Amino acid sequence: MNDSNQVSLSITGQTTPSINLGTDGSVGILTTSPAYELDVAGDIRATGSIITDTITTDGSNSDINISANGTGAVVVESLQIQGNQITATDSTQIAFGQQQLTDVADPTQASDAATKSYVDTQVSGIESGVSAGFAIAMSIAL
């Protein structure tokens, strides 16, 4: 981008130009050699919407932190993340990669997940009923 036809705007006293406009249409903010159409050396803040097809990190194991204010949702490929709920938006399975699913409430619907403690309690109740029924049947048979 550093060609003789570029336009640079600087704040008095700064050694690095604040904005560089290149003949290729690229814009550099606090960078003299923008590698993209808009290249910003620093944080970006938008009070309105940022509309994009993709969000990509620089490949150095960067986290992508996205906050949805209000009732907004963040959609990640086939997952929708809204508030404290993650939903598969198609037939995608949600895998936990050998990790535990924790803090699950007791099930109220047939499709709800159940904790080991809940299942153990239910099985224990069935075993007690079977044992009591068996004991009654034995005493009647004798």
Image (cartoon, helix red, strand yellow):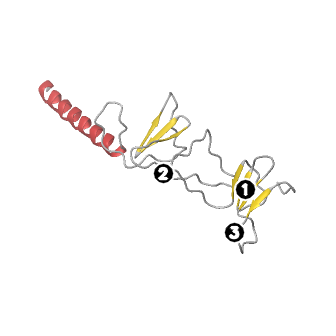
Name the foreground residue: 97 vs 23: 23
The answer for how far apart the CA atoms under marks 1 and 3 are is 14 Å
Name the foreground residue: 30 vs 86: 30
Residue annotated with mark 1 = 28
138 versus 6 height, above or below = above
Q: What is the secondary structure assignment of the residue under circle 1?
A: strand
76 versus 21 height, above or below = above
Q: Residue 67 carries which label?
A: 2
Residue annotated with mark 3 = 11
Label 3 crowd (10 A; few <14 / some 14-19 / many >=20): few
Q: Which amino acid does label 3 sit on?
A: Ile
- Residue drawn at (14%, 30%), measured in percent from left and top? 136
- Give yes or no for contact between labels 1 and 3 (Cβ–Cβ under 8 Å): no
Total marks placed? 3
Q: Which mark is residue 113?
A: none
Sooner in the amino-acid sequence: mark 1 or mark 2: 1
Q: Where is residue 123 in the image (x, y as percent from the top left)?
A: 29, 37
Q: Which amino acid does label 2 sit on?
A: Ser
Q: Position of residue 142 (x, y in %)?
A: 13, 27
